[in-house]
Image (cartoon, grey):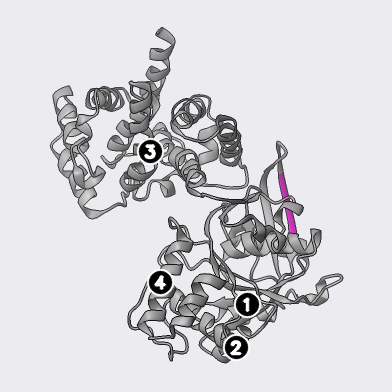
């Protein structure tokens, strides 16, 4: 069977190279490249993407063999119904291997039509490596590579302020644009580049902070034979993603004139401050994931969709989101509820088998960043404890005992955290006094929480009561007790 190429695509168009993309992985292709394809189809954007493989070798050569084309399957809930659809993404013009084509990479910097830079080099990609030099071909770090590229562009256009770029990193770190800009400027100083170049970076280029959201499982290994037969061609770059997408960009509204997402019906927004959007996403989506995982798994469930569809656990999660998380957010309630509705639909996605155990990796640090702020803010505003979230904390402590409903749990977390829980549970005798001591010691660990949680009024007592219920009666009866307490009031 023949490999996908432009002969399989009707009305294939060659477009101006307006976008430089660092990274050829599943997420960028299913998120950024898909959006650019939509812009080409529905607006006058008329641009293509040059993909740079920031490290390693091999992938872009194979992508070039497919003329930059790949198939995207979007699977999930759309307008209330499960939908599975696919399209051929056509916006990538070529891929460059920096280890073999560094000269072509620098030549791209001289292209007057180039306007945007996107990246996703993983959370560890935006780093500073003091051993990088301007003369390296290429530099080791992504910020080093970008600085070299920007310097080449600065020289090619003799510092023309109209030839700066709009840079939108998609790495999942807080204020990613600010951090990237900081490192680019640091390299300019390290390499003793002229002050005029530093001024050009600051005045001619825009580094936007971004928030990205789409679940992209990647290559459909289990169903590839069936998909290949359906498509009628081989595609080594098929990627699967959910229907939902959200792209929030902290930057001036005028960028929309060049990147007209508002004309294409995309869920992409330009805002003055990304912070409340990030908080909403982390607290509702990620916070719900982290809080529900130990409860659901110890209940005997395996995946997120099983949990949200379950009569008891599903209600527990919804009560947690709408009743405890949303009331702590400084964001319009109707927008929070709308976002939460989308989250519930995403949890229901019948095509995504998101295993609860995968969510429990590094659960203590996740609970600290995603759920603890909600718990503390709820107490501050309501002068009472959030019952579901407190129960989730008790479930987390029980989970770190390492015994699942039907199997031993392979725990994965910071070694100090694992050692703390191991020490607590190794001497447990099941008594209420022992459970209380475990809770007191865990909540009091500043290594875990950066504070002593025993100072939160009533928290230790409530967690102890819940943990004792879980340990003596099992998760199923313990969860039901939570609802019985509410009904009795």
Q: Quadrant of the N terminus?
A: bottom right
Residue that appears at 38% across and 70% down: 127
Q: Which residue is mark 4?
A: 183
Q: CA distance from mark 4 to mark 1?
A: 21 Å
In the rendered image, residue 271, in percent from the top left (x then y), is placed at 58, 50
Q: Quadrant of the C terminus?
A: top left
Q: Disc 3 on helix, strand or loop?
A: helix
Magenta-highlighted residues: 83-87
Instruction: Name above or below for residue 295 compared with residue 180.
Output: above
| First along the sequence among labels 2 and 3 | 2
The residue wearing badge 2 is 156
Crowd tier of the residue under label 4, counting other residues whose Cα lies within 10 Å: few below 14, some 14–19, many 20 or above: many
Q: Which residue is mark 1?
A: 163
Q: Is residue 346 left or right of residue 401?
A: right
Q: CA distance from mark 4 to mark 3?
A: 31 Å
Task: Identify the residue at image location x=68%, y=59%.
Answer: 35
In the figure, is residue 442 to the left or right of 412? left
Q: Are marks 2 and 1 in contact (CB under 8 Å)?
A: yes
Residue at 43% from the left image edge and 49% from the top image edge: 358
């Amino acid at each position: 069977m023949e490999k996908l190429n432009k002969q399989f695509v009707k009305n294939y168009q060659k477009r101006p190279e307006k976008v430089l993309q660092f990274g050829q992985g599943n997420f960028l292709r299913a998120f950024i490249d898909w959006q650019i394809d939509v812009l080409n189809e529905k607006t006058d954007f008329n641009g293509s993407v040059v993909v740079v493989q920031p490290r390693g070798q091999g992938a872009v050569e194979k992508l070039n063999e497919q003329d930059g084309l790949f198939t995207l399957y979007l699977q999930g809930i759309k307008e209330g119904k499960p939908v599975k659809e696919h399209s051929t993404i056509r916006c990538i013009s070529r891929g460059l291997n920096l280890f073999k084509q560094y000269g072509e990479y620098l030549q791209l910097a001289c292209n007057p039509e180039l306007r945007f830079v996107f990246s996703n080099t993983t959370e560890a990609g935006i780093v500073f490596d003091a051993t990088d030099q301007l003369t390296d071909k290429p530099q080791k770090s992504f910020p080093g590579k970008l600085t070299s590229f920007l310097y080449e562009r600065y020289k090619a256009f003799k510092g023309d302020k109209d030839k700066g770029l709009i840079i939108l990193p998609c790495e999942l770190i807080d204020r990613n644009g600010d951090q990237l800009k900081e490192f680019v400027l640091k390299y300019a100083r390290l390499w003793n580049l002229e002050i005029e170049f530093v001024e050009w970076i600051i005045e001619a280029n825009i580094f936007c902070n971004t928030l990205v959201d789409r679940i992209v499982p990647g290559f459909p290994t289990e169903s590839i034979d069936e998909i290949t037969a359906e498509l009628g061609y081989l595609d080594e770059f098929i990627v699967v993603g959910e229907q939902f997408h959200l792209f929030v960009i902290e930057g001036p509204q005028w960028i929309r004139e060049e990147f007209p997402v508002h004309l294409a019906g995309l869920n992409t927004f330009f805002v003055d401050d990304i912070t409340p959007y990030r908080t909403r996403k982390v607290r509702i989506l990620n916070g719900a994931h982290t809080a529900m995982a130990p409860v659901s798994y110890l209940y005997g469930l395996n995946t997120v969709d099983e949990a949200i569809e379950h009569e008891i656990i599903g209600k527990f999660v919804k009560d947690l989101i709408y009743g405890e998380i949303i009331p702590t957010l400084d964001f319009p309630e109707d927008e929070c509820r709308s976002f939460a509705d989308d989250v519930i639909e995403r949890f229901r996605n019948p095509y995504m088998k998101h295993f609860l155990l995968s969510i429990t990796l590094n659960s203590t640090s996740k609970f600290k960043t995603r759920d603890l702020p909600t718990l503390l803010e709820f107490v501050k505003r309501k002068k009472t404890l959030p019952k579901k979230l407190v129960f989730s904390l008790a479930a987390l402590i029980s989970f770190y005992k390492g015994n699942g409903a039907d199997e031993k749990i392979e725990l994965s977390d910071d070694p100090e955290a694992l050692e703390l829980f191991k020490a607590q549970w190794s001497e447990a005798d099941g008594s209420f006094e022992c459970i209380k001591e475990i809770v007191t010691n865990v909540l009091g660990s500043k290594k875990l929480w950066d504070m002593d949680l025993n100072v939160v009024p009533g928290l230790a007592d409530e967690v102890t009561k819940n943990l004792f219920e879980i340990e003596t009666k099992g998760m199923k009866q313990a969860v039901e007790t939570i609802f019985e307490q509410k009904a009795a009031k």
